[in-house]
Amino acid sequence: VPHDAEYVHSTGKIYLSEMFTGEVLETDLATGETLHFKLPADGLPPGGAFTQAGLPAPYGLTIPRAPHSLAEGADGKIYLADSIGSAVTAFDPKTRAFENFQVGNGALYPHTVRADAKGVIWFTIAFSEQVGRFDPKTRDMGVINLPEAPSLSTPGASIPYGVAVSPIDGGIWYARLASDKIGRIDPETLAVKEYDSPVRAPRRQRFDAAGKLWVAGFSDGAVAKI
């Protein structure tokens, strides 16, 4: 399950998060060659943080770390949301070295990751109703607990899913897939404000250059422009 892809400008290559084998794939567009790099367990057992918490790992995974999404940071490294390991993983495309940073704070299932203009890494945490923040410069890790919201899904969580950074003011916008909510986090104060989503089941979202937020409505078959 190669889940997400990212074109990295510093290398001119494509990198993918291979979720079910716990790898980063590096594809050279000039030659078509793909290399595989395994995320180090760093002491986590099969099933990762889920096993440690006495929970069954999603999809029956028996690997310790399963990267879900990835984004290029300001430092040229690739940052991955490690869903099973409850961590943010940094991959250096120059040295091919990994470094895992555990989220803590009860975080379960880091999901979608984005980098802001200052190099801070933001990521949704699907099962524990949080958004995470990691500063690679200071190595400061923290989470923002989201307001209570009813879940419209069988797992019983609102499932914070997509996250995007405004190019206008640096605001962090996230979508709660199973509660039909869109939220904004102030990057300085970490204050949260939520809105009813104009589309049902808002999932992934992206800003355009003009600062308009485009949101995919997973249950509507529609796209909203905010």
Image (spheres, rainbow, N blue to C red):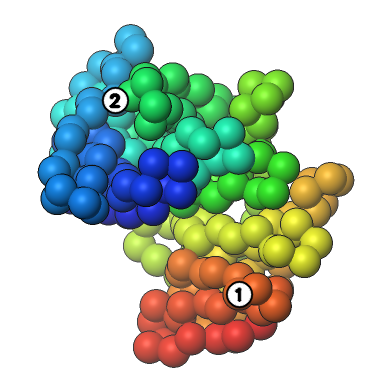
Q: Residue 121 or 210: which is nearer the viewer?
A: 210
The tag on residue 188 is none
Total numbered circles: 2
Q: Seen from this angle, which residue lies furthest right?
A: 189
The mark lying in front, picked from 1 and 2, is 1
The tag on residue 39 is 2
* Location of residue 100 with respect to 76 vertically, above or below: above
User: Label 2's element?
Assistant: loop
The C terminus lies in quadrant: bottom right
Residue at screen point 39% across, 41% down: 11
Q: Residue 125 or 36: which is nearer the viewer?
A: 36
Residue 94: x, y in percent? 39, 27
The tag on residue 208 is 1
- Mark 1–mark 2 distance (CA, rounded to whole Å): 32 Å
Circle 1/circle 2 CB separation < 8 Å:
no
Residue 50: x, y in percent? 33, 30
- Asked where in the image residue 195 lies, by quadrant, the reply is bottom right
User: Label 1's element?
Assistant: loop
- Asked where in the image residue 60 lies, by quadrant, the reply is top left
Q: Residues within 10 Å of mark 1 (few under 14, many from 20)?
A: few
Query: Identity of the amino acid at label 1?
Result: Asp
Residue 222: x, y in percent? 44, 89
Query: Identity of the amino acid at label 2?
Result: Leu
* Location of residue 86 with respect to 138 vertically, above or below: below
Does 133 sit left or right of 66 as displayed? right
- Asked where in the image residue 133 lies, by quadrant, the reply is top right
Question: Is any part of residue 127 visible from this angle?
Answer: no
Residue at screen point 55% across, 25% down: 104
Q: Seen from this angle, which residue lies furthest top?
A: 43
Does 74 sit left or right of 221 as displayed? right
Q: Residue 59 or 90: which is nearer the viewer?
A: 90
Residue 123: x, y in percent? 55, 46
